[in-house]
Amino acid sequence: MQQLVAAKAKREEYVKRIVVEVDGMKFDGDETSQDRMARSVVALNDDSETVEWVLADNTIAQVTRVQLKQALRLAGEAQTAIWANPYL
């Protein structure tokens, strides 16, 4: 049981450090960032519409809805790959 608790804590740390790349831009992919991306994807009306975004290196970029959707998908995939590890 103690090993599972330790593995879950390690998993949380890995998720907090997820970074994904889309079109040369690196996005934070932790759970809070995924929530923000999802809200922006829903709020943007058109795939070409842009929003100002703070990237993982703290630079600011104009990103499209499509780019955010890609970043969200990649971050979710990375999290899914990490998530099952404590149970294997």
Image (tube, helix red, strand yellow):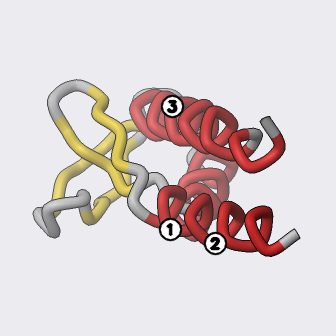
Q: Quick check: 79 above or below 35?
A: above
User: Judging from the image, what secondary structure is the residue with disc 2 in?
Assistant: helix
Q: In which quarter of the image is residue 60?
A: bottom left
Q: Which sits earlier in the primary sequence, circle 3 or circle 1?
A: 1
Horizontal side, residue 44 vs residue 86: left or right:
left
* Res 13 label: 1
Q: Which residue is drawn at 39% across and 60% down?
A: 17
Task: For label 2, count other residues whose C-alpha is less than 10 Å away and answer few (under 14), some (14-19) or many (20+).
Answer: few
Please tell me which residue lies in front, 21 or 14: 14
Q: Where is residue 72 in the image (x, y as percent from the top left)?
A: 55, 40
The residue singled out by tag 3 in the image is 74
Task: For label 3, count other residues whose C-alpha is less than 10 Å away and answer few (under 14), some (14-19) or many (20+).
Answer: many
- Mark 3–mark 2 CB contact (< 8 Å): no
User: Judging from the image, what secondary structure is the residue with disc 3 in?
Assistant: helix
- Report the amino acid beneath label 2: Ala
Exactly how many numbered labels are in the figure?
Answer: 3
Q: Where is residue 21 in the image (x, y as percent from the top left)?
A: 29, 34
* Res 9 label: 2
